[in-house]
Amino acid sequence: MENYLFVRRLLAWLSVPLNFNRMAAVGLRVFATLLVPLSLVTFFKAGKVLFELPAEAVLGGILFQMFYVVAIYAVVHTLFIRARDIDALTSGEFHIFPLTGVLAKAASEAMALYVALVAVGGGMYVWFTGKGIATVLNPPPRFLPVFGDTSFMGGIEFMAGGLFSAVAILIAGYLVFAVFRLLARVASPLDRQEPQQPAYKIRSGTGP
C-alpha cells in the first residue's frame, strides 16, 4: 500500500535543499516562458488600436509597441538569469534564506524593467496620440503609475513617474535581498557547527 502513496516520497524529495532550489528555478523559467504568449494579447490589442489611429499619430503606437516588446524581452531574460543564479545556490538547512533573496531580487528587477520601458513608450504614445495609456493597456497594471493626463506634460509625468517607480521597486527588492543574504550569513555557521571543546582544563592533583 505504501508504494501507492506518493506524498511521503514527494515531501522527502522537497526536503533536499538542492531539489527545492531546482524546483524553484524550473518554476521561474516556466513563469517567464508563459509571459510571452500572455503578453501577445496586449501586443495585438495595441496593434488593433494602431490601425484606428490617424496618420500623424501612428508613430506613437509603433514606438509604444517597440518599447513593449523590449520590456517583455527584458523581463523574460532577467527571470532566466535569476533562475540560473538559483541553480547555483549551495545547499544547507537554511537554504530558504538565499533562495527568497534571489526571488525578491528577480521580481524587483523584472518589475522595474517593465515599468521603466513601458512608461517611456507610453509617454511617447501620449505625445503623439493625445490618448491615455489605458487605450493600449486595458486595464493598466496596478504597479504602473497612470495619471490620466493626455497632454504633452501628461506624457512627461507618465515617463517620470514610471522611472521613479522603477527605482523605488529596485531599492525595495534589493533591500529584501540584502536582508535575506544577511540572514543566510548568520545562519551559515549553524549548518557546519562543530561540537565545542570545553573552555577549561581539568587540573591534576599534583599541581599547586
Image (cartoon, helix red, strand yellow):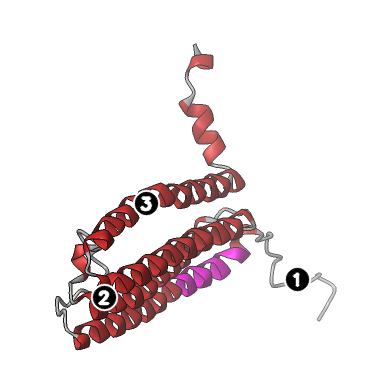
Mark 2 residue element: helix
Q: Residue sitting at 32 percent across and 53 percent down? A: 44
Q: Residue 40 carries which label?
A: 3
Q: Where is residue 19 in the image (x, y as percent from the top left)?
A: 58, 43
- Classify 10 Å Cα crowding around label 2: few (below 14), some (14-19), many (20 and above): few
From the viewer's perspective, is residue 144 above or below residue 27?
Answer: below
Q: Distance between the residues labelled 1 and 3?
A: 73 Å
Q: At label 1, which amino acid type do we have?
A: Lys
Q: Residue sitting at 55 percent across and 56 percent down? A: 83
Q: Is disc 2 in contact with disc 1, using a CB cutoff of under 8 Å?
A: no
Mark 3 residue element: helix
From the viewer's perspective, is residue 55 above or below residue 73?
Answer: below
Q: Residue sitting at 47 percent across and 49 percent down? A: 33
**Residue 175 within the segment the image draws in magenta:** no
* Bounds of the magenta segment: 176-189
Q: Residue sitting at 47 percent across and 19 percent down? A: 5
Labels 2 and 3: the sequence-earlier one: 3
Give the residue number, with chain letter if any, for mark 1: 201
Give the residue number, with chain letter if any, for mark 2: 56
Q: Distance between the residues labelled 2 and 1?
A: 90 Å
Q: Is disc 2 in contact with disc 3, using a CB cutoff of under 8 Å?
A: no
Q: At label 3, which amino acid type do we have?
A: Leu
Which quadrant is home to the C terminus? bottom right
Magenta span: predominant SS is helix
* Closer to the camera in the image, 125 or 11: 125
Labels 1 and 3: the sequence-earlier one: 3
